[in-house]
Amino acid sequence: ERTLIFLITPTYTRPTQAADMTRLSQTLQLVPDIFWIVVEDAHNSSRSVEDLLRRTNVPYAHLLGPRPPTHLDKRSGRGVSNRLRAFEWLRENYSNTTQKGVIYFADDDNAYDVRIFEEMRSTRIVSMFPVGLISTLGLSTPIVSRKSGKIIGFHDPFIGRRKFAVDMAGFAVNLQFFLSQKKATMPYKVGYEEDYFLKSLGVQIWQLEPKAENCTQVLVWHTKTKPADQPKLSLMKKVTNYTET
Ligand code: UDP
Ligand code: MN
């Protein structure tokens, strides 16, 4: 029985969505044994996302996880309601199963080297690896002790009060471990989503598994897609059918 990678992708309607989702979907076509959980931040599913999933040829679940009205402000994390919905779905479908799997948060606008998926596939508890293009440092990475080969700290432009100063794209979690941690959750608190989530899993730093050649290789980048000009959504809706709700 092969280990599946469960990719959780939050997405929402904006002018660059089709570009981002097309790039991601075609990356995933190169990856064996994955299951794509796409969660829209919307009350109704969009036709363009549905069509893209149908033609991609990757097993998927298409879910809705709209932000609650209490968390529409800037201090509430982006993609959190979507990821919480994916947690629910994983528990509904895989509790009391022996499915071997690894959970990874794959935002729709990042850039992925397909080798990252084989790195994370062997995750026993929580694995970590560097992420490129993070803020002013251009990098977020665990620090690995040359002596012990273990993760002993983090190099990230924002340490704050975080125990785990990592980016959402910088770690993966074993599915059965996640399912066994019933209190696992993600807060809406911007900047602390990763840290609180990892704390809620009850994982300790010494348990973290460094990947990507002891965290020396960048295989995922925190890219952000920017349109050449700022398209007006109202005009785009008139001239194309790029989204239907
Ligand atoms: N996202 C969402 N609703 C929003 C904003 C973002 O579902 O209102 C999704 C987005 O598609 C992405 C993830 O949440 O997959 C993180 O958002 P974004 O890339 O804007 O955040 P950043 O990378 O700047 O932290
Ligand atoms: Mn992003």
Image (cartoon, rainbow, N blue to C red):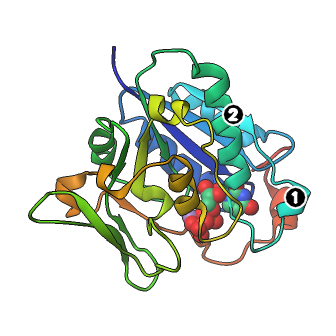
Quarter of the N terminus within the rendering: top left
Circle on res. 193? none
Q: Is residue 107 visible?
A: no
Report, in whole angstroms, how far the alpha carbon at label 2 lies from the one at label 1. Answer: 36 Å
Q: Nearer the viewer, mark 2 or mark 1?
A: 2
Q: Amino acid at mark 2?
A: Glu
| Residue appearing at x 80%, y 62% in the figure | 236
Is 10 on the left-hand or right-hand side of 120?
Answer: right
- 191 above or below 126? below
For mark 1, give the secondary structure. helix
- Find disc 1 in the rendering and name its residue: 238
Q: Position of residue 192 (x, y in %)?
A: 59, 67
Is 35 on the left-hand or right-hand side of 146?
Answer: right
Residue placed furthest toward the left: 147
Closer to the camera in the image, 140 or 238: 140
- 176 above or below 40? above
